[in-house]
Image (cartoon, rainbow, N blue to C red):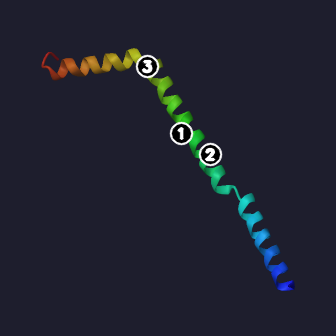
Amino acid sequence: MDKIAVWILVALRDLQSRISDEEGQTLAEYGLIMAVIAVAVVAAAAVAFRGAIIGAFSSATTCLSGSC
C-alpha cells in the first residue's frame, strides 16, 4: 500500500509541474503579439506613404510603357 501512495504522489507532482510549465505558451504569445504589431506597422506605413507609393508605381508604369 505504501508503494501505491508514493506512486500517486510522484504522479501528482509530475502533473503539477507539467501544468505550471507555461514557458512554451508564453513564447508563442509573444510571437503572436509581435506579428500583430508588425502587420499594424506595415499597414500604417502603407497608409502614411500612400501618395508616394502610387506615384512610384505610376512612374514605373509610364517608363515601362515607353514614355519615359
The residue most toward the left is 66
The amino acid sitting under disc 3 is Phe
Q: Which of marks 3 and 2 precedes in the sequence?
A: 2
Give the foreground label among 2 and 1.
2
Q: Above or below — where is 22 with respect to 48?
A: below
**Looking at the figure, which quarter contains the N terminus?**
bottom right
On the image, the x and y values in percent for residue 23 come to: 68, 56
On the image, the x and y values in percent for residue 62 come to: 20, 17
Q: Residues within 10 Å of mark 1 (few under 14, many from 20)?
A: few
Circle on res. 29: 2
Q: Residues within 10 Å of mark 3 (few under 14, many from 20)?
A: few
| Residue corresponding to mark 1 | 35
Q: Observer-nearest residue: 50 or 1? A: 1
Tags 2 and 3 touching, CB below 8 Å: no
On the image, the x and y values in percent for residue 14 come to: 75, 70
Q: Above or below — where is 33 with respect to 67?
A: below
Q: Which of marks 1 and 3 precedes in the sequence?
A: 1
The amino acid sitting under disc 1 is Ala
